[in-house]
Image (cartoon, rainbow, N blue to C red):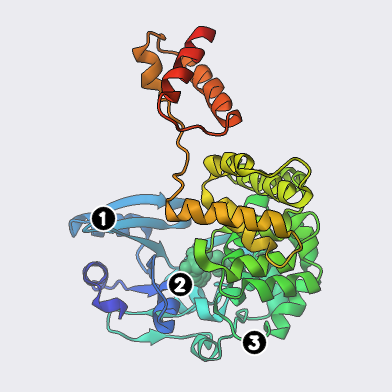
Amino acid sequence: SLLERPQLRRLLEAFNGGGEETRIVGGAVRNALLGRPVTEVDCTTTMLPEATVERARAAGFKAVPTGIEHGTITVIVAGEPFEITTLREDVETDGRHAVVHFGRDFVLDAKRRDFTINALSLGLDGRLHDYTDGMADLAARRVRFIGEARTRIREDYLRIMRFFRFHAEYAQGDPDPEGLAASGAERHGLAILSKERVRHELMRLLVARRAEDTIGVLADHGFLTWLLGGAAEFGRLSRVAADDETGPVPVWRLAALAVMVAEDADRLREHLRLSNDEHKKLAAYGRLLGLIKTWGLPLNALAIRRLVAEHGPELLGIVLAATTREPLPIVHEEAREALELFRKGAEPLPVFPLRGADLLESGVPKGPKVGELLARARQAWLAEGCRMDEGYAGELLRRVLEQA
Ligand code: ATP
């Protein structure tokens, strides 16, 4: 149980008593009850943030005010961090952020949370506090809003995304009808949220246990095209989800679901404010998919090697998983063989053979020039099929230096 964790116990022992109470809340309690892994432990406390810091330091723990305006202090006990937040009550909201006040009431703090299964708290004495019937919903594997769903969504429209994300991760059966109807009715409110927050929830949903059927629900209720800014390809998402070789990686799931042609990657970058790295992965997926589909330019080992050298064999694995059962036979066989070879290590993954140090040692002065020359050498190396034969590195270096 959670209370057997030595660091957590030490924390709770130091943070209870003297008229103050601190409990474990939210995801940690929920996951412990479900027997799922607990990665982060959040606590809630009657102490004001300054008092939390003081008590932590008096007990010899490090205290870092990581979100002091929300009342959150990160306390580190023997290397393990815990987030300690002062009890809160919502007072008003603009649909994006609730304005919260500190309080001393565990019931009010539970009731301002989103879903009943997220509102359980556990005290140092081992008592489980359930003010919202969360245990019943947990047992029934049901994600239900606390209070009236529509009202709760209007306070913070991100709760629509969270409803589907938690459903996908924890629920059984169909989504709660009230939550689903309210989400549909309030759908327009998603538009006022920052794209980053929406993306964060979407990416987590994509790797949740029941991602596929929840994405199906989102599509049936008209959310999906809006979320992706374009069409989706469910079959590919399920094939990638079923192929657990690479493990659930959000960006690859997004690729399988939403990238049908290379240009989709650019649209998605704008639409979801993706990072450069995420965009590069989607674009590579789109390019490889295009190569495999058109078979216009010969898809030989070279094209594969290039993309694999840039993005690792998982890219190829994802494209193959996504397009399995689509009529792309010859190419598929060839690509699959190449992938097997990469995986077995029989065909080593190409590694770019030059380092900045090689250029410096050859007399190139330190500065931006080094990076430029390396980038040019890398382009040449990719164009020449990621050669790895002996002597090639030296030859490449000589050519680069001639251009310097
Ligand atoms: P996970 O482990 O999947 O992150 P979690 O429950 O820890 O799950 P968080 O997003 O970290 O999820 O939120 C922590 C807790 O804060 C939730 O369990 C919930 O009680 C509360 N919470 C978070 N976001 C909201 C929100 N938008 N509205 C109301 N309560 C929220």
Residue 71 in picture, x, y percent from top left: 43, 57
**Residues under numbered marks 2 and 1 in contact, where contact means CB atoms less than 8 Å apart:** no
User: Which of the two residues, 208 or 358, is positioned nearer the viewer here?
Assistant: 358
Q: How crowded is the residue under tag 2: few (<14 C-alpha within 10 Å), some, or many (20+)?
A: some
Query: Where is the N terminus found, in terms of image quarters?
Result: bottom left
Q: Distance between the residues labelled 2 and 3?
A: 21 Å
Q: What residue type is labelled 1?
A: Glu
Give the numbered dot on residue 218: none
**Where is mark 2, residue-wise?**
27
Mark 2 lies on a secondary structure that is helix
**Residues under numbered marks 1 and 3 in contact, where contact means CB atoms less than 8 Å apart:** no
Identify whether 348 is placed above or below 133.
Answer: above
Q: How far apart are marks 2 and 1 (CA)?
A: 26 Å
Q: What residue type is labelled 2?
A: Gly
Residue 359 in picture, x, y percent from top left: 40, 16
Q: What residue type is labelled 3?
A: Gly
Please state which of the two labelled residues, at mark 2 or mark 3, is closer to the viewer: 3
State yes or no: Cβ of the residue under disc 2 lies below 8 Å from any atom of ligand 1. yes
Horizontal side of 229 relative to 354 (left or right) equals right
Which residue is drawn at the image coordinates 51% and 61% (left, top)? Answer: 246
**Where is mark 1, residue-wise?**
54
Residue 131 in picture, x, y percent from top left: 49, 85
Give the numbered dot on residue 173: 3
Residue 295 in picture, x, y percent from top left: 76, 47
Mark 3 lies on a secondary structure that is loop
User: Which of the two residues, 299 or 183, is positioned nearer the viewer here?
Assistant: 299
Which residue is drawn at the image coordinates 80% and 59% (left, top)? Answer: 231
User: Which of the two residues, 89 or 306, is positioned nearer the viewer here?
Assistant: 306
Q: Is residue 118 visible?
A: yes
Mark 1 lies on a secondary structure that is helix
